[in-house]
Amino acid sequence: MTESLFSGLKVVDCASWIAGPAAATIMSDFGADVIKIEPPGVGDPWRGRGPLPGRPVDYYWQLTSRNKRSLAIDLKHEDGIAALHRLIASADVFVTNFPLPVRDRLKLSADHLMALNPRLIYASFTAYGEEGAEAAKTGFDSTAYWARTGLMDQVRAEATTPPARSMPGMGDHPSATGLYAAIVTALYRREKTGKGGVVKSSLLQNGLWANGCAVQTRLFGEHVAHRPVREDAPNALAGHYQTRDGRWFIMALYNEQRQLRGFLSAIGRPDLTDDPRFATDAARKANARVLLGILDAEFAKRDLADWRVILDGVGITFGIVATVDEALDDEQMQACGALVPFADGNGLTISAPFHIDGVEKIAPRRAPDIGQHNESVLAETGYSAEEIGRLRGLGVFG
């Protein structure tokens, strides 16, 4: 394995779907040895999910389980649990999102595993937290992160339209980063004290954090209204505009005192600088709909490629409303290390969303097949070839 920051760190990924496993994926990017625990035969249910049914490539799985080794064992079998317990005895981190009653039944609760390994970091992820009436309730990011926290309600086009639909993993991946932060914080504490411990995170907490601006406003007693439709927005200099070729971009011109004159000159409307309808902040807000109409007409005169050059030339903050297809050729995404090639040179994947100066991430390896590393992982924990054969005969591998 490539020598990196987490080389020698053993992480047991005993979670399913996205958030918990993705936290382990981040650790794998920095060299951790991540062992994915799966049920034999079917594997993690996330394997079978994908945007294109029937395609031979498990796209989502390659993102969430790259770099990992797969150990497929039946945890309902006492020998399967015994094998996992032996693995955990030498592990540094254990990640799970199993429902709390299931953990107790399988002897995978924090109490069970911390007794086997006091230096273990037990990373627990749930939908709604581990206290309260809904602690045992199941949830996905669409239901707990987006819907429950007000995010889904607030990002709808307007108050009367149906709630917006979130994309797959849109809340899980940010939540994974939060869980990763908890794990690394606990590892830091272990370096200071020598003791492991339990860390917890949930979709609900992460979603509330993501919607913190709106919720905190409400906590102080203020009403949080739905955002107005585009034509009624109070600031015409911070919004979406469509170009001649049908593309959209969003502009965020907030430093109006310094940038407005240059902006108006660049778009060919220096005459608006001294127009009393737009000469002050208050006037621009009062006449926002009028200014919006003027800017609509101006931006419709050129293609997006032209406007990118013009707006960049005067330092205006804006972003194109890109399509997923455009990520394939986005040079900046590759230049900043957000998109990286697989180690086999075939295609790209999305790297962990941060960098540490002087620390190289490993070249991402393809996600494993179900049970691909059964024998090697068990041999490393002390199982002999004969014992592994016995487990196979007992059906522990399916």
Image (cartoon, helix red, strand yellow):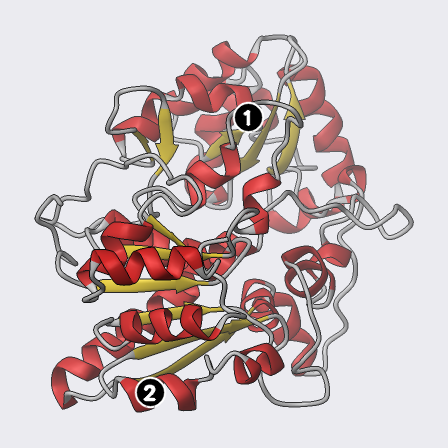
Describe residue 159's horizontal placement relative to residue 175 as left or right: right
Up the image or down, 341 lies above or below 281; here it is above
Q: Position of residue 290 (x, y in %)?
A: 77, 32
Describe residue 245's horizontal placement relative to residue 193 as left or right: right
Local SS, label 2: helix
User: Front-most of 361 and 300?
Assistant: 361
Going 60% across and 64% down the picture, which residue do you hit?
211
Q: Position of residue 320 (x, y in %)?
A: 53, 26
User: Front-most of 316 and 324?
Assistant: 324
Q: CA distance from mark 2 to mark 1?
A: 43 Å
- Which amino acid type is marked by label 2? Met
How many callouts does the rendering have? 2
Describe residue 148's horizontal placement relative to residue 268 as left or right: right
Going 44% across and 44% down the picture, which residue do you hit?
370
Can residue 78 be seen in the rendering of this structure?
A: yes
> Of label 2 and label 1, which has the lower sequence position?
2
Q: Which residue position is annotated with label 1?
A: 324
Q: Position of residue 373 (x, y in %)?
A: 31, 47
Which of the 4 image quadrants contains residue 176? bottom left
Local SS, label 1: helix
Going 43% across and 20% down the picture, which residue do you hit?
328
* Label 2 environment density (alpha carbons within 10 Å; few <14, some 14–19, many ≥20): some
Can residue 129 be seen in the rendering of this structure?
A: no
User: Front-most of 237 and 275?
Assistant: 237
Q: Which residue position is annotated with label 2?
A: 114
Up the image or down, 209 lies above or below 282; here it is below
Going 50% across and 31% down the picture, which residue do you hit?
319
User: Front-most of 283 and 97?
Assistant: 97
Residue 372: numbered disc: none
Describe residue 365's horizontal placement relative to residue 77 as left or right: left
